[in-house]
Image (spheres, rainbow, N blue to C red):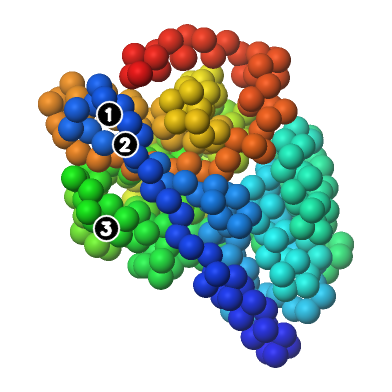
Amino acid sequence: MNDWVTTAINAIEADNQRSADTHLFKLELPKLTGIDIYLKDESTHPTGSLKHRLARSLFLYALCNGKLREGMTVIEASSGSTAVSEAYFARMIGLPFVAVMPRKTAKTKIAQIERYGGRCHFVDSAPEMHDEALRLAGNVGGYFMDQFMYAERATDWRGNNNIAESIFRQMQYEPHPVPATIVMSAGTGGTSATLGRYILYKGYETRLVVVDPENSVFYESFMTGDRSLTRSCSSCIEGIGRPKVERSFQPDVIDAMIKVPDPSSVATIHWMERLTGRRAGPSTGTNLWGALQIAEEMREAGQEGAIVTLMCDGGERYLDTYYNPDWVTENIGDVRPALEHLSRWA
C-alpha cells in the first residue's frame, strides 16, 4: 500500500510542478479613479477552474490520511467543477471516479467528467447529493471524498502556494499592494476559509467579504449565527450556494457578507464579456457584482484601494445555460435591469 500511495502522491506533485500560477488581471474602469479591481483567473488550471486546487488538496489529504487504496472507487457530491477536477486526478492515479450531481448540471461539465474517465450519477436536487454519495460509497466499498466536509482542512492556509499567498505575492508591485478587500463566493466555504485564515495569519489590513447567491443559507447563517439552517431547493448559480451550512464554512474569519440576486450574477458575466472579451462562469458574476458594490461604497466614502476577486472558471462550460438567452429567461429571469445598472461603469 505504501508504495502505491507514494507513487500516487508523486504523480500529483509532479502535475503541480508542471502547472504555472494563474494570472491576475486588472479590470479597466476609468470611472473608478483610485480604486482598482482585479480578477484572479482560475480558469487557466489544467481542469479549467478554481476547483483544481481543491481537488489536488483533497486527494493529497485522503492519501496522507490512509483513506485511499489501490483500486478503490472515489465518490464525490459535486455540481460540476470539483467533479471535473477530481476525475482528472483520479484518472492520474488509476482510480475509478463517480460524481453525484443534480440532473440540471451543465452538459459541458458532464462531458468533461466523462472525458477524464469519470461516471455521473444523477439526483433531482442538491439536497440529495450528500446522502446518495454516502450510499454509493457504502455499496461499492469506495471512499466519499466529501469536499463539503474537508475543503477547509485539506488546504494549508499558512501558505505553500495556496490561493491567498498567490494573490498577495502577485499584488506586491501594484499601486495598492495590500488589497482593501478580497471578495469570494462560497460553495464548500473552503476557499474563503483559506483566505480569511491567511489574512489573519499575516496580519494584513484586508477585509474578506463573502458573496452568496439566492437559495443559499450561508448569508442567513452568517447574519444570525444559526448553523442549523436548511433549504429544500438548489442554488441556480452553479458551483456556489448550499441548502445547508457546510462544515467547511468558517464564518469567524469573514468580515461581511453580501446577498446577490441571481439575475445580477448572470448579467455581470455578460457585462464582463462585453468589457473584456472574457467569458466566465456564473459564480464569477456573483463575485464581481459584489466587488462592484464595494467599489461604489469606497468611492462614495472617498476611499482608495484595491479589490481582488476570482474568476472561478471559464464560460465555455455554460454555453447551453447561462449564455443561452432562452435558458436564462426560463431559469433566471429578466437580467436587463441588472445590465442597465452595470452600464454606468462603462
Q: What element carries label 3?
A: helix
Q: Residues within 10 Å of mark 3 (few under 14, many from 20)?
A: some
Q: Which residue in the protein does label 3 denote?
A: 200
Q: Which residue in the protein does label 2 denote?
A: 37
What residue is shown at x 40% (from left), y 17% (from top)?
A: 342
Mark 2 or mark 3: whose residue is earlier in sequence: 2
| Residue 148 percent across, percent down from the top left | 58, 53
Discs 3, 1 touching: Cβ within 8 Å = no
Residue type at numbered disc 3 = Leu
| Residue 324 percent across, percent down from the top left | 68, 21
State left or right for residue 121 relative to residue 13: right
Discs 2, 3 touching: Cβ within 8 Å = no
Q: What element carries label 1?
A: helix
Front label number (2 vs 3): 2
Can residue 230 be seen in the rendering of this structure? no
Rounded to the nearest whole Å, what is the CA distance between mark 1 and mark 2?
8 Å
Residue type at numbered disc 2 = Ile
Name the disc covering residue 39, or none.
none
Q: Nearer the viewer, residue 168 or 278?
A: 278
